[in-house]
Amino acid sequence: MCTVTFIPSGGKIYITSNRDEKHWRSNALSPAVYPFTSGNLLFPKDGDAGGTWIAAHENGNAIVFLNGGFIRHTPQPPYRKSRGLILLDLLNTPNPVMAFTSGSLHQIEPFTAVIWSSGQLFECRWDGQQKHTAGLSVTQPHIWSSATLYDEAVVEKRKNWFKKWLQQSRKAAQPSPDDILHFHQFTGDGDTHNDLRMNRNGQVFTVSVTLLALTDEMTQMHYLDLKNNTAFTQNLIVEKSMAGQ
């Protein structure tokens, strides 16, 4: 839930997330399709609370979460519900952005939600007191870094890495899934505390990279388990009768 990119390329939308977690957290389950009241959802399941940090709906919508709103906050548990379960609540609706703006987030820890809904891109932030929603360009790439792990200087440095990588990628060809996964694993300046694949003395480190490739017909999820050095791919057909809901 800590580094996210949005990249339109080759007629597809790619949303990719690096999950940085504490060493004591349980391993996540590989991506699978789960039935919900609104339809099928595809996501890797958190081994502790049963939620997730990235998911896609068979109606074509998708959400990825990052920890924190705008600034690093001091956790104030107990919280009413995990953020990973809030993500599933939002996606299990026809309109996740409307669900965000209308639902109660009382006693929920701050988060940033990147939402792809009905062909539009939204950034929805909960700072613990207020909700903030912004529409973003779907033709331009974007990158986010978690406010709980990265200060403003590091966030800007990562944006510059992203900009340079995009310039290099477009000189050759549009970025492919393999290109994007490589960027998420190997970009940095040798500072393991702040590289995209980070490791802070074995206490907090990048445990996985998940890429969503979205089209009007199908969503494909590529999942790299970096703790166990395994890879997994799962498809979800977009139901035309649900698309745009």
Image: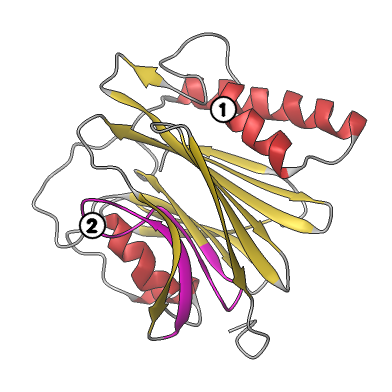
Q: In this view, does 67 lie to the left or right of 169?
A: left
Question: Is residue 184 at all visible to an observer of this figure?
Answer: yes
Whole-Å distance between the Cαs marked 2 and 1?
27 Å
Q: Would residue 100 be visible to someone looking at this image?
A: no
Q: Name the residue under label 1.
A: 185
Q: Give the range drawn in magenta.
A: 38-62
- Left or right? Give the position of 11 relative to 85: right
Please, what is the three-letter code of the amino acid marked with disc 1? Gln
x, y percent for residue 50: 26, 60
Q: Is residue 159 above or below residue 121?
A: above
**Image quadrant for the C terminus?**
bottom right
Q: Picture coordinates of residue 202 (x, y %)?
A: 29, 18
Outermost bottom residue? 241
Extreme residue in the left direction: 78
Residue ID for mark 2: 82
Other residues around mark 1 within 10 Å, as few (<14) / some (14–19) / many (≥20): some
Q: In which quarter of the image is residue 75?
A: top left
Give coordinates of residue 217: x percent, y percent: 72, 74
Q: Is 55 part of what is drawn in magenta?
A: yes
Q: Is mark 2 on a helix, strand or loop?
A: loop
The amino acid type, in three-letter code, at marker 2 is Ser
